[in-house]
Amino acid sequence: MKKSILVTGATGNVGRYVAKYLQENDADIVVAGNRVEELEERFPGARHVKLDFEDPATFDAALEHVDRVFLMRPPQIGDAEVFRPFIDAMRSHSIRLVSFLSLMGVERNPFPPHHKIEKMIEEAGIPYAHIRPGFFMQNLTGVHAEEIRKDDEIFIPAGNSKVSFIDAEDIGKAIAHILSDPEGHQGTAYTLTGPEALDYVDIANQLTILTGRRITYAKPGMIHYRSRYINERGLNPAYVNVTIALYMMTRLGTAKAVTDDFIRLTGEPPRTFFEFARDHRNDFG
């Protein structure tokens, strides 16, 4: 029987594109998440399953007839230990390759949960291909878009650091290439970035050009950022704390490297931030 590829987080920024490009390659996919009705609507040609990493009773159905997995950590889960039972379940199902959506520079940074999840996968003996992308361009059209729309400012505690932003669609495209050739990518790790490193003043200037409004970079401190995102915007404290850890590392220069891993995997150049922002101009309106 032909085996399928399990795509977790299939309605998310990256998972939706992993599923899209796998389907374009005629792969059999299983899309997983908590909202099965939404999965059925978005991916009519796929098998749809409920998967909750905190409910082991959902694991076997999700992994049935599956031999490859795209694994991502839902943002609201900050405790890496939550994933240990699912990783054990993947091992018992003889998965040929798990491609985990990790984080740029995490091999040198033990604080984010991604580091521990990578180690769990390796210690379980499951063939892996870790994906370590730079910051998503979608962060600016997603969680950080509110201040841009309402206040004409970027409210991110990254100091003067530079970031090699990458489009989540490019990440999904690269992962689809990897999962389509599992034997060729076992025991690997790829750092995916865009073609250039920009600071948030650069981003503000590009958004100013595109929107016709003067967009500025507020450069808040960590305490101010945490207070606003938890107390005013009502975001989960565990999620906000993870982002603070990431921005602290970013200030140390961990997010500015530019690699050619995307080009080597896909044969195409990655998208620039200006191209992305131009096509998503309405999100900043």
Image (cartoon, grey):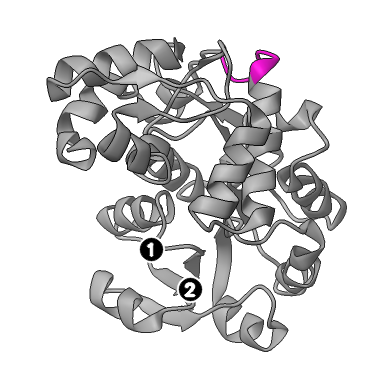
Q: Is residue 170 visible?
A: no
Report helix, strand or loop for mark 1: loop
Decide whether residue 270 is among the magenta residues.
Answer: no
Position above or below: 114 against 40: above
Q: Residues within 10 Å of mark 2 (few under 14, many from 20)?
A: many
Name the mark on residue 11: 1
**To which quarter of the image does residue 269 belong?**
top left
Find residue 177 and report its horizontal and vertical position in percent: 43, 42
Q: Amino acid at mark 2?
A: Gly
Q: N-terminal of the two: label 1 or label 2?
A: 1
- Bounds of the magenta span? 251-256
Name the mark on residue 257: none
Q: Is residue 221 visible?
A: yes
Q: Residue furthest right?
A: 123
Find residue 83 and report its horizontal and vertical position in percent: 74, 64
What residue appears at the point 41 percent right and 57 percent down from the top-left corner? 12
Q: Nearer the viewer, residue 143 or 20?
A: 143
| Cα distance in 3D space between marks 1 and 2 | 8 Å
Q: Residue furthest bottom?
A: 57
